[in-house]
């Protein structure tokens, strides 16, 4: 993994935290995509931050699946 990949995704033990902002603003879509793919292939899960969804929408989605 390159230094660029490390700045986009931080490894906290098992689950990788992936900053989605560079994908959203177009500044580094490929590195974010590569980081997501690598993490999903090796770990099977990511913690996505700066994804643009407000907490209210997230809470509503959780309410809908209960």
Image (cartoon, rainbow, N blue to C red):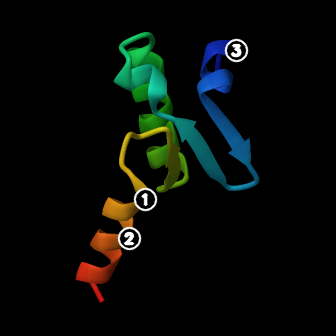
Q: Quadrant of residue 59?
A: bottom left
Side of 35 relative to 8 (left or right): left
**Quadrant including the C terminus:** bottom left
Q: Which residue is mark 2?
A: 59
The residue at the point 38 percent across, 40 percent down is 52
Q: Which residue is mark 1?
A: 55
Sequence order check, earlier mark of 3 and 1: 3
Q: Nearer the viewer, mark 3 or mark 2?
A: 2
The residue at the point 47 percent across, 19 percent down is 31
**Quadrant including the N terminus:** top right
Which residue is more in the foreground, 17 or 36? 17
Alpha-carbon span between mark 3 and mark 2: 34 Å
Q: Nearer the viewer, mark 3 or mark 1?
A: 1
Side of 47 relative to 52 (left or right): right
Which residue is most to the right?
A: 13
Which residue is more in the foreground, 27 or 55? 55
Alpha-carbon span between mark 3 and mark 1: 31 Å
């Amino acid at each position: 993994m390159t230094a660029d990949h490390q700045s986009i995704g931080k490894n906290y033990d098992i689950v990788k935290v992936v900053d989605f902002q560079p994908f959203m603003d177009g500044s580094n879509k490929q590195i974010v995509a590569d980081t997501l793919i690598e993490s999903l292939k090796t770990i099977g899960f990511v913690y996505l931050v700066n994804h643009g969804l407000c907490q209210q929408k997230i809470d509503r989605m959780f309410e809908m699946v209960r």
